[in-house]
Image: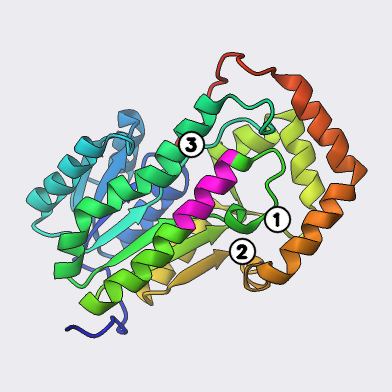
């Protein structure tokens, strides 16, 4: 039996597969890993975004794979393609994610919820599972991009938050299950990151702006996609079991079992929250057409 991985993970001359690589955090991470010497397999539903990334990093040590993470068969093909083109696969970052417009459980379109779960939760499994035999053989590393939303109050965002809580549990299970094989896994947690996903949800949506204001400083402080990518890349280098960006979310995560019951009670009584819930409930009655969803992260 192999011992759990304890050494640092140098990405130089290793092969990394990154989903959601056509924009946001995924694009920034692919660039950074490439700069640090990795071969990168870029995966996204958006071929234009992928080609822009390849044009930025150059054609060397790069492959492009157009795929939707909800397509289980295609994701198995992508893993096989990456191994065939690069000769190996050492690192997988399950990053692709979406979120719908803010909504309450009463009024949400459950098709929105199903799609978020299909990408943010099941898409993680579709990405990771076919890669695990090769990752184990290489004593590699897996990163599941969750979110601080996994342990935050779910006002108006239960689809995203519950899917990220599930992604967190997938990442935690992987940490334990890969250890006997000498491989490793980590979960990446972010607060608010300046990506198209955050802009569409918080800035372009008037109710989203109110939800952002309600959380307040310092928790609503935003970081750049590059800062988020650096957090992941540095965590990969140390085989970290968890990374947080910004770091101010770490105490909340550690104390969530104590803080969240009290926070729930505060929000239950907060009239500003009541007003927001009522506002969300008037926006779209059940059965209305699905709003355009955001791009993958």
Query: SS of the residue at dot 3?
Result: helix
| Point 15% across, 61% down: residue | 134
Q: Is residue 67 left or right of residue 150?
A: left
Residue 221 is marked as 1
Query: SS of the residue at dot 2?
Result: loop
Q: Does residue 4 lie above or below 39 as drawn?
A: below
Q: Residue furthest top?
A: 288
Residue 116 is marked as 3
**Place of residue 56 in the rendered image (x, y in percent of width and height, measured from the top left):** 33, 44
Q: Which residue is mark 2?
A: 246
- Mark 2 surroundings: few (<14), some (14-19) or many (≥20) residues within 10 A: many
**Place of residue 207 in the rendered image (x, y in percent of width and height, measured from the top left):** 76, 32
Q: Is residue 241 left or right of residue 15?
A: right
**Res 53 seen here:** yes
| Point 8% across, 57% down: residue | 87
First reached walking from the N terminus: tag 1 or tag 2: 1
Q: Is residue 202 left or right of residue 130?
A: right
Magenta stretch: helix, strand or loop mostly: helix
For discs 1 and 3, the disc positioned in front in the rendered view: 3
First reached walking from the N terminus: tag 1 or tag 3: 3
Task: Give the quarter of the image for residue 104.
Answer: top right
85 or 142, nearer to the observer: 142
Q: Is residue 280 left or right of residue 45?
A: right
First reached walking from the N terminus: tag 2 or tag 3: 3
Task: Give the quarter of the image for residue 141.
Answer: bottom left
């Amino acid at each position: 039996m192999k011992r759990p991985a304890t050494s640092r993970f140098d990405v130089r001359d290793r092969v990394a597969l990154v989903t959601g690589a056509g924009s946001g955090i995924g694009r920034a991470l692919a660039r950074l890993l490439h700069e640090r010497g990795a071969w990168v397999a870029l995966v996204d539903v958006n071929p234009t975004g992928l080609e822009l990334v390849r044009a930025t990093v150059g054609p060397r040590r790069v492959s492009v794979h157009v795929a939707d993470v909800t397509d289980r068969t295609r994701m198995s093909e992508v893993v096989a393609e990456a191994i065939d083109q690069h000769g190996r696969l050492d690192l997988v970052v399950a990053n692709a994610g979406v979120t719908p417009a803010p909504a309450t459980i009463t009024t949400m379109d459950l098709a929105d919820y199903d799609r978020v779960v299909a990408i943010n939760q099941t898409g993680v499994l579709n990405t990771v599972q076919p890669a695990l035999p090769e990752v184990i053989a290489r004593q590699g590393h897996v990163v599941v991009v969750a979110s601080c939303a996994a342990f935050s109050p779910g006002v108006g965002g239960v689809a995203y938050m519950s899917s990220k809580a599930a992604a967190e549990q997938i990442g935690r299970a992987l940490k334990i299950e890969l250890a006997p094989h000498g491989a490793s896994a980590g979960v990446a947690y972010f607060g608010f990151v300046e990506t198209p996903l955050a802009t569409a949800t918080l800035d372009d949506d008037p109710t989203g702006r109110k939800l952002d204001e309600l959380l307040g400083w310092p928790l609503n402080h935003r970081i750049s996609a590059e800062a988020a990518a650096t957090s992941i890349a540095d965590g990969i280098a140390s085989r970290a079991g968890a990374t947080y960006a910004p770091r101010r979310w770490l105490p909340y995560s550690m104390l969530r079992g104590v803080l969240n019951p009290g926070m729930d009670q505060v929000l239950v009584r907060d009239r500003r929250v009541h007003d927001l819930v009522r506002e969300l409930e008037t926006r779209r009655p059940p059965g209305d057409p699905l709003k355009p969803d955001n791009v993958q992260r």
